[in-house]
Image (tube, grey):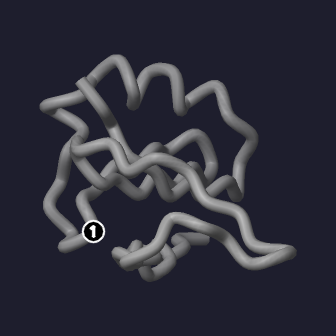
Amino acid sequence: MTRTLPEPMHSSPIPDPGLRPGWAAEPKWDGFRDLVSVDAGQVVLRSRRGTELGRAFPEVVADSARLPDATALDGELVV
């Protein structure tokens, strides 16, 4: 079974770093936005626009292969 990658979430700048009760935030690091999908041992690593990133980050592909099947991750690769 082939799964499609989820749509990436997009961050939004805010003018005031004060957070309302019940809200959380994290620092914004610039890097490569990536989506990882693992299905039947097959790892797909793509940018948020769908560009294949596996050849540029072979270590991420290799480490992602150890994740359970049906795993999808959305993150930032910061070098």
77 is higher (above) or lower (below) than 39: above
**Residue lying at 40% horizontally and 73% vertically, measured from the top left:** 11
Graded by Cα atoms within 10 Å as few (under 14), some (14 to 19) or many (20 or more), the crowding at tag 1 reads: some
Find disc 1 in the rendering and name its residue. Answer: 48
Quadrant in the picture for the C terminus: top left
Depth order, front residue of 35/26: 26
For the image shown, how many numbered marks are present on the structure? 1
Residue depicted at 37% across the width and 77% down the height: 15
- Furthest toward the right, the residue is 22
Question: Which residue does the image show at 23% across and 42% down from the upper left?
Answer: 31
Percent x, y of residue 18:
60, 67
Q: Which one is in front, 16 or 42?
A: 16
Quadrant hosting residue 13: bottom left
Q: Quadrant of the N terminus?
A: bottom right
User: Is 68 on the left or on the right of 38, as rendered?
Assistant: right
- The structure residue drawn at horizontal position 28% and vertical position 56%, both measured from the top left corner, is 46
Q: Is residue 55 above or below residue 7?
A: above
- Indicate left or right for 64 with 56 as reference: right
Image quadrant assignment for residue 58:
top left
Three-letter code for the amino acid on which mark 1 is drawn: Arg
Is 13 situated above or below 35?
below
Pinpoint residue 37: horizontal percent, then vertical percent. Answer: 51, 55
Q: Name the spot of residue 63 as percent of width and height, x first.
A: 51, 21
Tag 1 secondary structure:
loop
Image coordinates for residue 44, horizontal then vertical, percent: 38, 51
